[in-house]
Image (spheres, helix red, strand yellow):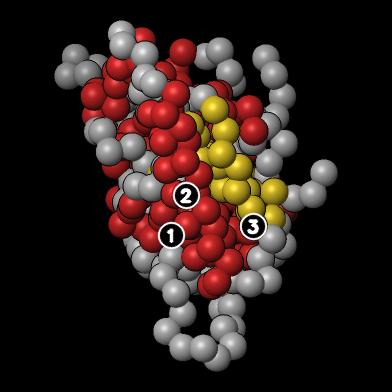
Amino acid sequence: MDHEIVVGYDGSESSRAAVDWAVDAARLRSSRVRIIACLEVPFTTCIAPLSYDALAGIAAATEELAMSVLRQVRQQHPLLDVFVDVLDGPATSVLQRESKDADIVVVGASGHHGAAALWLGSTARWLARHSTCPVAVIRKETSKGTGSETSCEPPRNDGPQMALPPRTGRVLVGTDGSSASDEAVLWAADEADRRGVELVVVHGWSFAYRPVDLGSAQARDFTHLDAAELLDRSVELARERCGVSVTGVLREADRTTALTALATPGDIVVLGSPHHGQVTSTLIGSTVNGVLERSAVPVIIVPPTMPL
């Protein structure tokens, strides 16, 4: 099938930023963009069913919302292959199903934070755990400074519009030595090559000090050495894959802090996702959840290619 980037759109500012980012990613890949708007029946209909006219009104409003952003994108990028689908169902299941063969699925970040985001549910978190293709999670604030040239506003003049290449700072990828992080490193290397930017491989490590352990200083040194060797292996893996500059960064910090503290406007952060079925991806405090919560730049979650 043709290369395709799927992006969810619900009219929110974060989903508009997701459309902007998807457009840039598609231009880098010569892919088409498929904007999906989901028609979800309000929860209140379970108690008091809506009339046919009310449901038709919701469907018409959703259709117009999707067509509006489509017109804006086509006006900005007339040569881009972009289209819209309005589909019935919750965004989580619809986007997961419709993106199974996509290059990337792009969504706006949830407005919820911390434990509330886990309990209330989040399309981004759901896809990060269940998607079979990479998931890009975009915050509203990242629509500027991340390379996006799409503002969803009409051009300011009637002359020809030249499509400028996206501007990206660096690609940052977290590694912990697992097969999942190796896949993320390889994906990040390809992305850095595609964008022509520096790849930064980041490993956060820590040592659990115990006051009664007389050999703690030596044990810490060994832990540090093991962490450095792990990072060196990941850096070498990346250098074998891509032709851009690859830098390794070793930080004595938890992995979430190591990544988010390094990221600056224009960067993107890449992480591997645990194999489907592993509970670690749903636990509060996991690296994936932590980075999704704290990162101000786009985060790409790369799923495993090999099942358990």
Percent from the top left, x then y, of residue 252? 32, 41
**Quick one: label 3 or label 1, which is nearer the N terminus?**
3
**281 or 254: which is nearer to us?**
281
Tell me if label 3 and label 1 are in contact, CB under 8 Å. no
Quarter of the image for the C terminus: give it: top right
What numbered label is drawn on residue 267? 1
* Amino acid type assigned to the residue bearing label 2 in the image: Glu
Q: Is residue 215 visible?
A: no
Q: What element carries label 1?
A: loop
What numbered label is drawn on residue 46? none
Q: Which residue lies furthest to the right in this view?
A: 1
Tell me if label 3 and label 2 are in contact, CB under 8 Å. no
Percent from the top left, x then y, of residue 7? 54, 46
**190 or 51: which is nearer to us?**
51
Say left or right for 252 vs 194: left
Q: Label 2 belongs to which residue?
A: 64
How packed mark 2 is, by other alpha carbons closer than 10 Å (few <14, some 14-19, many 20 or more), is: few
For marks 3 and 1, give the CA distance: 25 Å
Residue at (52%, 53%) from the top-left corner? 67
Which quarter of the figure has residue 212? top left
Residue at (67%, 45%) from the top-left corner? 103
For marks 1 and 2, give the CA distance: 33 Å
Residue at (46%, 79%) from the top-left corner? 155
Residue at (41%, 70%) from the top-left corner? 153
Q: Label 3 belongs to which residue?
A: 82
* Amino acid type assigned to the residue bearing label 1 in the image: Asp
* Amino acid type assigned to the residue bearing label 3 in the image: Val
> Considering only vertical position in the picture, is 226 above or below 67?
above
How packed mark 3 is, by other alpha carbons closer than 10 Å (few <14, some 14-19, many 20 or more), is: many
1 vs 2, front mark: 2
